[in-house]
Image: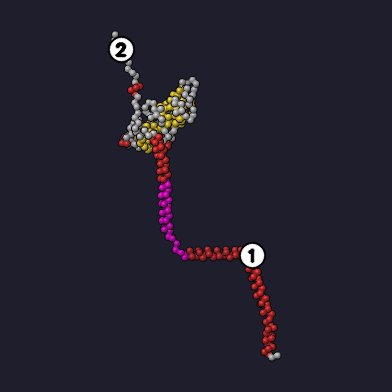
Amino acid sequence: MTKVARSSFVFRQAHMPKLQTRSILVVGLLLAGLGLLGLSQTGMLEPVQSALLAPLATLQQWVARATGGASALGQPQPDLDTLRQRNAELEAQVTQLQSDVVRLRENEAQLNLLAGLLNYARTQPDNRYLAANVIGRDPSPFVHYVILDRGSNAGVQKDMPVVTGQGLVGRIVQVTSAASKVQLIVDSTSAVNARLQASRDEGVVVGQPAGGLEMQFISQQASVQPGDLVITSGLGGKYPAGVVLGTVSVVEKQAYEVVQRAELTSAVDFNRLEIVLIIVNFQPIDFGPFLQPTPTPAVPAP
């Protein structure tokens, strides 16, 4: 064997184990890859994948925040005066919106009041009404008056009745050119001829010092029950007939008395009067001449 051939043989003998080892490693890695691919397709490697990817996801989020903060530092920041001006503008807008809400709610309340008055006016088509705002109240706890923003310039006259959609308020007792004063029916000097709507029995509704109402001079034989509606009778000529005064709350009947009495719950909430109606075409009747004693005719001398 020549020297060259001997060297080639020795080289192959020396490197043969390394080639075989590499071949086996390649085949093993290939088989392992194919096995992992098959396991991945079946979903058996998902827990392992999740465990390996969780730290990587956390690291990626940290890097994103760091780079985002760094990029934000490079951006121009808004001026402090600009921020203050914008804040003032927003506060002004909030104030305006709050004012608009209050105004809209007030308009809604006014419309509801006017709707109630309009419905009442429709039920009494023979009357003509003038709407008026309550602009003042008597501060005394024992005298009950309100001031309206309508006077003689608007056609208001003394003794005109005043009502709301709920019932009778009172009557005009004093008039100026631009305002008028109303005596409420709960005033202690007020008296209104009244009638029990169910039984048609009559009496007089008078105001009480504390501001309540009481129906007096009811016949002892009259049937009076709590809840009975009381209306104006029209007797006396001061008020039109059929206007609601209130409902009976308590009946006071004593066997030894000739008449009975009843406490009333007023139909009108006098503490919340805002808008009222003045009946401008009602003409009170003066019963004074009929109440004077008839003069005795002179007896001729014999």
- Answer whether residue 203 is magenta in the image: no
| Looking at the image, residue 41 lies above or below residue 8 | above
Looking at the figure, which quarter contains the C terminus?
Answer: top left
Dominant secondary structure, magenta: helix
Is 59 placed above or below 291 here? below
Residue 77 magenta: yes
Q: Where is residue 154? Give x, y as percent.
A: 32, 36
- What span is in magenta? 73-102
Looking at the image, residue 83 sits to the left or right of residue 176; the answer is: right
Residue hosting label 1: 42
Alpha carbon distance from label 1 to label 2: 138 Å
Which residue is label 2 attached to?
Answer: 299
Quadrant housing residue 295: top left
Dot 1 or dot 2: first in sequence order is 1
Q: Is residue 117 visible?
A: no
- Identity of the residue drawn at 69% across and 91% down: 2
Q: Position of residue 46 (x, y in %)?
A: 62, 63
Disc tally is 2
Residue projecting furthest to the right: 1
Residue at the left extreme? 301
Q: Are marks 1 and 2 in contact (CB under 8 Å)?
A: no
Q: Residues within 10 Å of mark 2 (few under 14, many from 20)?
A: few
